[in-house]
Image (cartoon, rainbow, N blue to C red):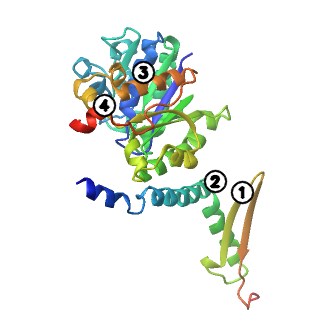
Amino acid sequence: MRLLDIFASSRPKGSSAIAKERLQILVAHDRTERGRPSYLPTLQRELLEVIRKYADVDMNAVSVSYEQEDSREILELNIILPETARR
Amino acid sequence: MARIIVITSGKGGVGKTTTSAALAMGLAQRGSRTAVVDFDVGLRNLDLIMGCERRVVYDFINVINGEASLNQALIRDRRCDDLFVLPASQTRDKEALTKEGVGKVLDDLSQTFDYVVCDSPAGIEHGATMAMYYADDAVVVTNPEVSSVRDSDRMLGILASKSRRAETGNEPIREYLLLTRYSPERVANGEMLGLEDVQEILSLDLLGVIPESMSVLNASNAGIPVILDSESDAGQAYGDMVARYLGEELPHRFLEVRKKGLFSRFFKE
């Protein structure tokens, strides 16, 4: 039994390193989600309604992103207008 | 005014009730009048861990609904005169815990107690949010395991955004980490997240590390808070936790693999 233990200990280290790596990614993702204002989805929908009055755009044409850096908060709107925007 | 402490985690089965019982008993043993309140409506367990399940007559919901007075519902601990248990209801639905009702009961407890320990149910639903809403301090109980650490982090987000202190713009809840079911052997073998790993992710004030221990199950079997088992490693670790909560600076114990002596090597404990 002792001899087997020696071989066992020469295997690569256990799974805790993987656990830590997965957690770090997951927690970072959770935290960015958490920082966002809860009104973002509604904002996106209402913006789209306004834009649709003037241009024929679909749901995917408006993207709203929100970033936090130290003391600044950046709300970025990206609207892709179709080539024939004027009706 | 009492200090309101919530014992929370997100994930179930990590040791919230064991910790609530230990912290409440520890504070009371040091002479502070302490009440420990079970927020797990429908699945109450605190009374079992405290060993007073046969003395429950009225519960938290009865008090909220005005069917019993606080004094009728509070159960005085037989081992420590300064400790009282407010059991949860076994049958009623969780919505009976209204924000106003809970606030009133905690306010009344605050008049006569030094500490109110709130034992939160698992999850992030109504019962858990009610348990943490009025808290001044939070002990986040975490196992060195991925889902527990993630849930703890999510709970930290909730503490920071949905508590009364957050809503009224007061000083935020003081958050502490308590790492439980820690096995130094498995950490050394690379099978379990170590204290440093968990701290790198959560970075909280560390209140204590409770080793995985037979004594926790023994204590719950007998209905005796494990902190009273001062011979055991977990009991001592909980004792240290209470001291640290009260401001003492103690080194963390039970983090290293215990070296086997010559005797136990031969006789394989």
Kind of residue sitting beneath label 4: Val
Say whether disc 4 or disc 3 marks the residue closer to the N-terminus.
Answer: 3
Q: Are marks 2 and 4 in contact (CB under 8 Å)?
A: no
- Residue B73 lies, with reference to residue A72, above or below; the image says above
Q: Which mark is residue B24?
A: 3
Callout in the foreground (2, 4) = 4
Residue B32: x, y in percent?
48, 12
Q: Quadrant of residue B234?
A: top left
Callout 2: helix, strand or loop? helix
Kind of residue sitting beneath label 2: Gly
**Tag 2 residue:** A35
Q: Are marks 1 and 2 in contact (CB under 8 Å)?
A: yes
Kind of residue sitting beneath label 3: Ala
Callout 4: helix, strand or loop? helix
Q: CA distance from mark 3 to mark 2?
A: 34 Å
Q: Quadrant of residue A65?
A: bottom right
Residue B75: x, y in percent?
33, 15
Does residue A69 appear in this view? yes
Q: Are marks 3 and 2 on the same chain?
A: no
Q: Chain of mark 4?
A: B
Q: Chain of mark 3?
A: B
Q: CA distance from mark 2 to mark 4?
A: 38 Å
Callout in the foreground (3, 2) = 3
Packing grade of label 1 (10 A; few <14, some 14-19, many >=20) is: few
